Image (cartoon, grey):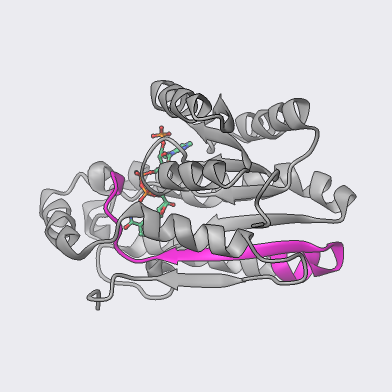
Amino acid sequence: MLHVEGKVIILTGASSGIGEATARLLAQNGAKVILAARREERLLYLQRELQQRGRIVEYKVTNVSSQSEVEDLVMYTIEKFGHVDVLINNAGIMPLSYLHERKVSEWDQMIDVNMKGILYGIDSVLPHMRKQKKGHIINVSSVTGHIVHKTWAVYSGTKFAVRAITEALRQEEVKNNIRTTIICPGGVKTELANTISTESIKKEIDDSMDIALSPNAIANGILYALSQPEEIAVNEIIIRPTRQE
Ligand code: NDP
């Protein structure tokens, strides 16, 4: 039996890509999954599909850059299932640009979703997990949370921050039996590049997609981290396409 069976798992960014694939895999393995994202029609469609197969799935429309909406998501989960075992902070956006283009509002959005969204998630579940004296927080960073290239300044900055925040969280909460995992995907075929408004950069990303992985590859990594017995913490996983530099 995998250790995900029966676990109550909040999953942000569940409406597409890595989140959607992870929702399917976790629900199929017996987890109780609460899907969160902004696009309600996508969440509803996924919930219906999974429920028809007998999976236990709820959803709550949530903008992770709103602290109160993230708090509501956690409260909703506790009302439905009584507690939270796992939070997967997966929601993210990637409007890459050159710094000289001065796309300040895109920088703000990335910081709000990729960084503050994760902090709001941690803030909302931590009191419950500390009280339970157990829990697992999985934060999705990136290979670009380890290395930076031109045009990736702000996105990479948020993903470096995700790793920093997660490692500090790990050190602070080991005594409370709270596990942390950083997931660092390389190129994955999803909708992530759709927010890139600089045409040449969007083309570069689109052109790199021929070697990109299926979102299932990342979902499998998340399942691996979640499937370990209580005494084993998988703290970080990097998953790249074999042919990615
Ligand atoms: P997608 O664009 O397919 O998925 C992103 C998800 O985040 C969507 O479900 C979207 O839902 C959600 N989201 C975006 N903004 C918000 C918000 N404000 N509030 C709530 N949800 C939001 O891309 P991926 O699946 O690729 O991205 C998932 C994670 O993986 C991200 O953190 C990304 O940075 C990371 N990653 C992806 C890589 C890749 O190559 N694809 C590589 C490395 C890391 P909605 O729009 O409905 O709100």
Q: Position of residue 199 (x, y in %)?
A: 12, 48
Please indicate whether residue 62 sits to the left or right of residue 125 in the image.
left
Quadrant in the picture for the N terminus = bottom right
For image coordinates 61% across by 29% down, the residue present is 69
Which stretch is magenta? 169-192
Q: Position of residue 192 (x, y in %)?
A: 31, 47
Q: Can the viewer see residue 158 in this picture?
A: no
Quadrant in the picture for the C terminus = bottom left
Q: Is residue 181 magenta?
A: yes
Please indicate whether residue 175 sits to the left or right of residue 63 in the image.
right
Outermost residue, front direction?
A: 1
Image vertical order of residue 239 relative to residue 46, above or below: below
Total count of labels: 0
Image vertical order of residue 133 relative to residue 66, above or below: below
For image coordinates 64% across by 48% down, the residue present is 87
Q: Can the viewer see residue 117 in this picture?
A: yes
Image vertical order of residue 196 relative to residue 154, above or below: above
In the image shown, does 23 or 51 lie closer to the viewer? 51
Ligand 1 shows up in which quadrant of the image?
top left
Q: Quadrant of residue 109?
A: top left
Q: Position of residue 176 (x, y in %)?
A: 85, 62
In the image shown, does 146 or 52 lie closer to the viewer? 52
For image coordinates 24% across by 55% down, the residue present is 97
